[in-house]
Amino acid sequence: MFQPRNLNEDRKPCRLCGTWRAVAAALVLLLGVMPCAAPAQGTGLVGDELFFQTAAFRIPFSVPTGAQVYKAKLWVSRDQGNSWKLGPEAAPEAREFTYTSTDGDGSYWFAVQTITTDSKAIPPVIQGNNNGQVLRVVVDSRPPTVNVKLMQGQEGSAKVEWTVYDEHLRIETLALQYRVPPGNQWYLVPIDKKETLGFQTWNAGMQPIEVQVTVQDRAGNIGKGTAVSSPPPIGGTPGGSGSPPKYTQPDTDIKYVNSTKLRLRYNLSDVGKSGVAHVEVWKKNMPGSWDATPFVDKLFTGDHHAPEPIEVDLPNEEGLYGLTLVARSGVNVSLPAPTGSEPPQMVVRLLRTPPTVTITNVVVGSGVSTGRVTINWQASQKDNLMSRQCITIYYAGHDGTWQAINTNTKLDNIGQYVWSIPQNYADSKISFKVEAVDWAQNVGLATKDNVILDLNPPSAKIQGVDVSPQAP
């Protein structure tokens, strides 16, 4: 160890913090050596070795008051003391060595040699293990390798198998978590036996899940492996029928409405001295031809700088309608009415049929899923005019007041959601409602009433055995 020595005439060598453990506690990665990444500190101490992620250190030392020391030299060995090379030198008042290396991972041994004011070296030669006065450091920048395999059963069971490897593994840090996409809440799964080649089973419910297995090494590197289960059919359990809905984006050139009564806002330009006498609304069914006469002919009154909206009543039939405005001046001058394949100024999609929504089942969790409820639903629209995020789920207690589970944003229409039961609703009856909205803001909904959130599993115990009488 780097222990001070008593020399004649009160000449004492440099020492690294008095004892080896003090050195170990003071040894930190060199801040600022690698400015592109925050330095990481070693977390493992095995025997007499320290573990770090990069070869960049500050090694502090102290010199006793009155010691006749001219300078201190740091020696470095990369082959466990078989050979030594001179590293940085420091004046006594520097109080530390700065050492960096581009040699990468591996073993680093450090030894200190002091030079007195009369040019004597203590110890005279650094060789071997320097009589035990060495600091041993292992640089390890590579995270552990983690391979994960996930399997789910139709009854809600989940099984994760893993294989982890690292030369300096800390197997006690092994951790298994799972979540239900698209949620960000991770749930910790207790591991029965932490080993490099192992597995764990638990009840994760019927929903598709994502798992991650993490483990650390002695240098603090974190290895992670993930796996995602195949999502079951929407509204069903694994192996059931049905298929996920298709998702498309609304056409930005189309206005989606759920009412036949519209108010068209517009502006006027190039108005002459005779002003504006009429504003016509021309309509076409798409695909199709323009109507032969105006759909609406409004007598214009008021200020042409701020015209009032025109009220339009579309036919009841759902579909695409093209609309174009034509203004006529006070002397009956206007641009030509639209004909043929001329595109409309606006395309309106009338959509009045709401999405179809069904709650297929509600599963109260058990085991590691205790305290959570899995809500399964199916929501679709006949022409797939729904975005992926179109679902809102509500719950209501005995007072019948609906409260949204997802208050910040709509949920993805993936057919399942896992909800953590509020503490004041445990062991009570609760109702659920699932709403789906389409591009025209039609809302389809389904409810599931009086779901009993019984979180107490009953237990049974044999009290005795009776022999049933045999038939004669």
Image (cartoon, rainbow, N blue to C red):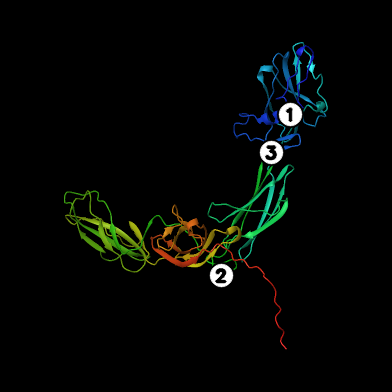
Quadrant in the rendering for residue 364: bottom right
Please give the name of the residue rendered at 56% of the width and 70% of the height, measured from the top-left corner.
Answer: 241
- Judging from the image, what secondary structure is the residue with disc 3 in? loop
**Amino acid type, label 3:** Ala
Q: Is residue 356 visible?
A: no
Estimate the spatial distance between the alpha carbons at disc 1 and disc 2, rounded to whole Å.
67 Å
For the residues labelled 1 and 3, the Cα–Cα distance comes to 19 Å
Secondary-structure class at tag 2: loop
Given contact means CB atoms under 8 Å apart, are the residues at marks 1 and 2 in contact? no
Picture coordinates of residue 48, whole percent (x, y): 76, 34
Q: Which mark is residue 219?
A: 3
Type of residue at label 2?
Answer: Ser
Residue in front for this viewpoint, 45 or 220: 45
Q: Can you tell which mark lies on residue 370?
A: none
Most foreground residue, 11 or 129? 11
Q: Are marks 1 and 3 in contact (CB under 8 Å)?
A: no
Q: Nearer the viewer, residue 378 or 301?
A: 378
Q: Residues within 10 Å of mark 2 (few under 14, many from 20)?
A: few
Where does label 2 land, which residue?
241
Q: Which residue is mark 1?
A: 20
Quadrant in the picture for residue 353: bottom left
Quadrant holding the N terminus:
top right
Q: Position of residue 426 (x, y in %)?
A: 50, 60
Mark in the foreground, 2 or 3: 3
Q: Quadrant of the C terminus?
A: bottom right
Q: Is residue 321 above or below residue 142?
A: below
Whichever of labels 2 and 3 marks the residue nearer the N terminus, that label is 3
Answer above or below: position of 172 versus 284. above
